[in-house]
Image (spheres, grey):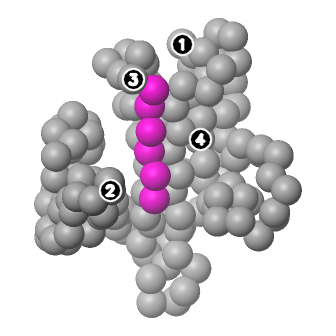
Amino acid sequence: MRLAHRMKIGVRNRQSFFAERIDTDNVFGGFDSENKLQGIIGISCSTTPKLRHVATIWGMYVRAEMRGTGLAKLLMKAALEAANSVSTVKLSVATTNYPAQALYRSFGFREWAIDVAALYVDGVFYDELLMRLDLKADECSKKPLFDGNLL
């Protein structure tokens, strides 16, 4: 299994949400031995003066068959290392996603609020747990950390 930093994908509309995120944020992918993407995480560091001490993990996903293999921990570690100079990392997770909450807590994230009815999927509202990890630094740096085999 290997991680890659700043994955590039073919997108016709370069203004799309995901294309812009991949171009400007730290995005890491976990690949298997056949080069198939098995997991992904994205972290964005604010550039505004009042918020440049904050990074936000805006997305994380690991394929079901790869859960429990340690890939999620590798992805989270890569994202946190990319935000090594912020003082706070924030994320949100559905209140029903207990495995993800356990992962985030294992890295030191703690709950600071619940966003009621934050998500609406297939006619059902879901609450989101807002979590944060408080570190000690000033602003976010963007540098590639992983681009080879880890396991």
For badge 4, the amino acid type reads Phe
- Identify residue for label 2: 121
Q: Quadrant of residue 146?
A: top right
| Magenta stretch, residue numbers | 58-63
In which quadrant is the C terminus drawn? top right
- Identify residue for label 4: 28
Residue 62 is a magenta residue: yes
The answer to whether residue 24 shows anywhere in this view is no
Which is nearer the N-term, disc 3 or disc 4?
4
- Identify residue for label 3: 64
- Disc 3 residue crowd, few under 14, some 14–19, many 20+, Cα 10 Å: few
Foreground tag (3 vs 4): 3
Task: Indicate left or right for 117 with 87 as reference.
Answer: left
Q: How many marks?
A: 4
Residue 122, given in percent of the width and then of the height, sits at 32, 54
For badge 3, the amino acid type reads Ala
The answer to whether residue 73 shows anywhere in this view is yes
Q: Secondary structure at mark 3?
A: helix
